[in-house]
Amino acid sequence: MARPTICRKVGSTPKGNYFKPQGIPLKQLKEIVISIDEFEAIRLADYEGLYQDDAAVRMNISRQTFGRIVNIARQKVACALVNGCALKIEGGNVSIESTTDGPPCQCEKPAPEPV
């Protein structure tokens, strides 16, 4: 029998729960589900750039568990990108602990206005 899943701390819920290729209706797409704790693992490791040890502490899990979660999440995101699938974020045994995040979408500089 498997051990019960420990409740994982999450900084916040995602701003949106669906991501899909543009121009294709959702009902025509295969859907890949990523849990909220998998989303949080990607946010901490890839967006915030934390080491696995530090990210695991923030989520109240072991480093090994964090490593498994982030690897599964990355595989799901890669599968959605490569195969043009919709990505749905939902579920998971999580406890939401709100943090003060910076403004969203700081990844790129805004595109210049057309002349």
Image: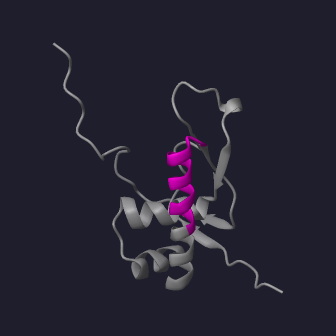
Q: Position of residue 12 (x, y in %)?
A: 52, 56
Reply yes or no: does residue 78 show up in magenta. Answer: yes
Q: How many marks?
A: 0
Part of the protein shown in magenta: 72-85
Q: Position of residue 59 (x, y in %)?
A: 52, 73
Question: Coloured how?
Answer: one colour
Looking at the image, which residue is at 47% across and 80% down?
57
Give the main secondary structure of the magenta stretch: helix
Is residue 75 or residue 87 the one in the foreground? 75
Q: Position of residue 1 (x, y in %)?
A: 84, 87
- Residue 62 in sight: no
Reply yes or no: does residue 52 show up in magenta. Answer: no
Whether residue 1 sits left or right of residue 47 in the image: it is: right
Q: Position of residue 2 (x, y in %)?
A: 78, 84
Quadrant housing residue 6:
bottom right
Q: For the C terminus, give its image quadrant.
A: top left
Looking at the image, which residue is at 54% across and 61% down?
75
- Residue 51 in sight: yes
Looking at the image, which residue is at 50% across and 46% down?
81
Whether residue 105 sits left or right of residue 8 in the image: it is: left
